[in-house]
Image: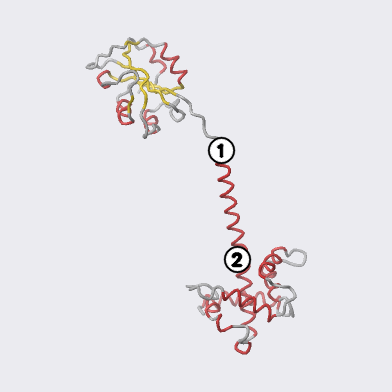
Amino acid sequence: MTNNAISYTDIIYKEIIKEVKSLEKGFLYNTIREILLEDDANEQITIEICRQSGISPDAYIADDYKIAYGVMTKFSDIEFESTPGKDYVRSVSKMDPSNINKRTEMEELKLIVLVSCTLVGAYFCIQYIKDQQNKRNKKRSENSRRPTPIPIPAALCLIVPANTVGRLTNGSSINVDDLSYLIDSTSDFICAAKSEADSIEQQMTMSDKIPSDSIREVYIRIDLADGRNLIGKKILYMIKTNLQIDTDFFVEKVACLQNLNGLKFFNHV
């Protein structure tokens, strides 16, 4: 046995044995209760652990040893690196209850103490796992009940030089790369709900004739099915980073400005 294993096992054994060594029956039951610091008035966890493991408070040490041996047999094929008590586990085949003359009373008691610690640890491990599962299930349930956000139709309105418009016309579509290019060329912009964009547009004087080779200010309106992440943004970078990259955008209007009166509602770059 490694030094650490000896140290841990002996410390636990010495602390527990002085409390239960005088018992004639229920050694395994009372060892578990002692580890849990429970007493006659409060032994719910002890009762639950012992009920699940078939441990009786009236069992003699020979019966307790059989149960302890059965528990450790389940671990006998596992390779442990530095687990306290690993030598007990590896030698469990030599501690068969029928080989009563091949072990000392201290060996019996130490195995029972070790198994008591194992059962108590397993109980709290299971409780922890159940608690974490309940938390995950509760979070999933809350997420499933969370209402789907309602889309907010919006309009992205840009003022760009006429020579950047290209072949865009009313009703055409534009992909995210071409829209990003227009945004980079923008001098003024606003992203607003469709109703607000309609109101602003009515206060602007525009012409459908666009001189393609000039730098005259051209108004481009892009309608968005859902502009929740764009409405009210005042920085172009925030507009670009919140665009949907897997969709085409609908060009509602392209027109040349006749004057700059309506730009008071826009964000100037």
Q: Position of residue 119 (x, y in %)?
A: 62, 69
State the residue lying farthest toward the right. 41
Above/below status of 126 relative to 74: above
Helix, strand or loop at mark 1: loop
Which residue is located at x 50 percent, y 73 percent?
A: 78
Task: Identify the coloring.
Answer: secondary structure
User: Type of residue at label 1?
Assistant: Arg
Above/below status of 89 relative to 170: below
Q: Position of residue 50 (x, y in %)?
A: 69, 69
Above/below status of 128 relative to 180: below
**In the displayed structure image, the side of residue 241 where residue 90 appears, left or right:** right
- Mark 1–mark 2 distance (CA, rounded to whole Å): 36 Å
Q: Nearer the viewer, residue 43 or 13?
A: 43
Q: Nearer the viewer, residue 149 or 19?
A: 149
Q: Position of residue 112 (x, y in %)?
A: 64, 77
Which residue is located at x 58 percent, y 58 percent?
A: 129
**In the displayed structure image, the side of residue 90 where residue 12 appears, left or right:** right
Kindly identify which numbered label has been placed on residue 122.
Answer: 2
Which residue is located at x 36 percent, y 9 percent?
A: 205
Q: Nearer the viewer, residue 48 or 2?
A: 48
Q: Nearer the viewer, residue 155 or 35?
A: 155
Kindly identify which numbered label has been placed on residue 9.
Answer: none
Which residue is located at x 60 percent, y 65 percent?
A: 122
Q: Are marks 1 and 2 in contact (CB under 8 Å)?
A: no
**In the displayed structure image, the side of residue 113 where residue 246 appears, left or right:** left
Q: Position of residue 251 (x, y in %)?
A: 35, 22
Helix, strand or loop at mark 2: helix
Residue with the mark numbered 1 = 146
User: Type of residue at label 2?
Assistant: Ala
Q: Quadrant of the C terminus?
A: top left
